Image (cartoon, grey):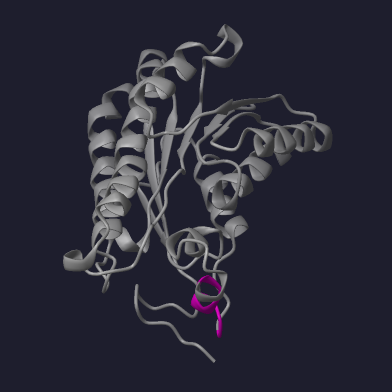
């Protein structure tokens, strides 16, 4: 039975890879992101290639009113969301607490924590009422280990780890599956955003080893949704073979 999959941050990286993976299996999609033109391009491409229905919503998960109105205004045919992929997230800056940019902190907290909460709060009640659904939160190795100059980003991903466990507890009586997928180094726009557009610095992060690709994470996201009804993957930590921990990588 095909599913209706809601993906935040679907215009690039892991979110886009998830959209392609679920579309290839014939599932219908609701894709959200801040870049309207990019959303339309992706929608047209997926519908043409995979003959699925795709609805796009331009929104910033940091905007509470935007999130709730977007979900409330979904037509009846798009209300029964089977899978929510809370993918929107970012790291900005790489400095110590004493030298940190407060605007960077607020952007990370508002996106990675509050944005996840807003979207989950908007969609979960429908899942609970139907006693069916799967929430997948994209976490990080940064939510398992704190590393130098990662401070606030790590804190937001520790929050994702905690919230995933909390949602599982709160929704278990309704039979809702809840999963965290926590990647190590994945080559996406992540480092470009972290280094505020400095591509040379961003590229250096992934030199000397093969990082994870967005498709690797999408494969795992898809996998956890294919298991029997009585099976839930609570937490999945995925690393490149060359990465042993948040800070230990084998580079050639």
Image height of 177 relative to 78, above or below: below
Residue 109 left/right relative to 74: left
Tell me the quadrant of the picture where the N terminus can be found.
top right
In the image shown, does 24 or 131 lie closer to the viewer? 24
Tell me the quadrant of the picture where the C terminus can be found.
bottom right
Task: Estimate the x, y position of residue 15 in percent, counting from the top left.
Answer: 56, 45
Residue at 32% x, 53% y: name it: 104
Residue extending farthest bottom? 252
Segment colored magenta: 202-208
Image height of 172 relative to 73, above or below: below
Residue extending farthest right? 48
In the image shown, does 165 or 100 lie closer to the viewer? 100
Residue extending farthest top? 76
Number of numbered discs visible in the structure rendering: 0
> Which quadrant of the view contains residue 222?
top right
Task: Estimate the x, y position of residue 218 in percent, counting from the top left.
Answer: 57, 51
Residue at 45% x, 65% y: name it: 195
In the image shown, does 169 or 136 lie closer to the viewer? 136
**Residue 245 among magenta residues:** no
Residue 31 left/right relative to 141: right
Residue at 55% x, 51% y: name it: 14
Task: Estimate the x, y position of residue 99 in percent, counting from the top left.
Answer: 21, 67
Image height of 245 relative to 26, above or below: below
Task: Estimate the x, y position of residue 223 in percent, counting from the top left.
Answer: 55, 47
């Amino acid at each position: 039975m095909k599913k209706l999959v809601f993906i935040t941050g679907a215009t690039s990286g892991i979110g886009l890879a998830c959209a392609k993976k679920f579309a290839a299996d014939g599932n219908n999609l609701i894709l959200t992101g801040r870049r309207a033109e990019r959303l339309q391009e992706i929608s047209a491409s997926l519908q043409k290639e995979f003959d699925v229905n795709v609805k796009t919503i331009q929104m910033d998960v940091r905007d509470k009113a935007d999130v709730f109105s977007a979900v409330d205004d979904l037509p009846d045919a798009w209300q029964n969301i089977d899978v929510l992929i809370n993918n929107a997230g970012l790291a900005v800056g790489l400095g110590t607490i004493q030298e940190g940019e407060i605007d960077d902190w607020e952007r990370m907290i508002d996106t990675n924590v509050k944005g996840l909460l807003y979207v989950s709060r908007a969609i979960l009640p429908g899942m609970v009422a139907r006693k069916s659904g799967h929430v997948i939160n994209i976490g990080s190795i940064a939510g398992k280990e704190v590393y130098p100059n990662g401070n606030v980003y790590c804190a937001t991903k520790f929050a994702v780890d905690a919230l995933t466990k909390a949602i599982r507890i709160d929704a278990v009586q309704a039979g809702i599956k809840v999963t965290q997928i926590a990647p190590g180094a994945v080559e996406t726009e992540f480092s470009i955003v972290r280094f505020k557009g400095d591509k040379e610095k961003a590229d250096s992060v992934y030199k000397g080893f093969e990082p994870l690709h967005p498709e690797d994470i999408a494969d795992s996201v898809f996998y956890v949704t294919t298991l029997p009804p009585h099976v839930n993957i609570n937490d999945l930590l995925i690393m490149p073979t060359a990465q042993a921990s948040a800070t230990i990588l084998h580079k050639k």
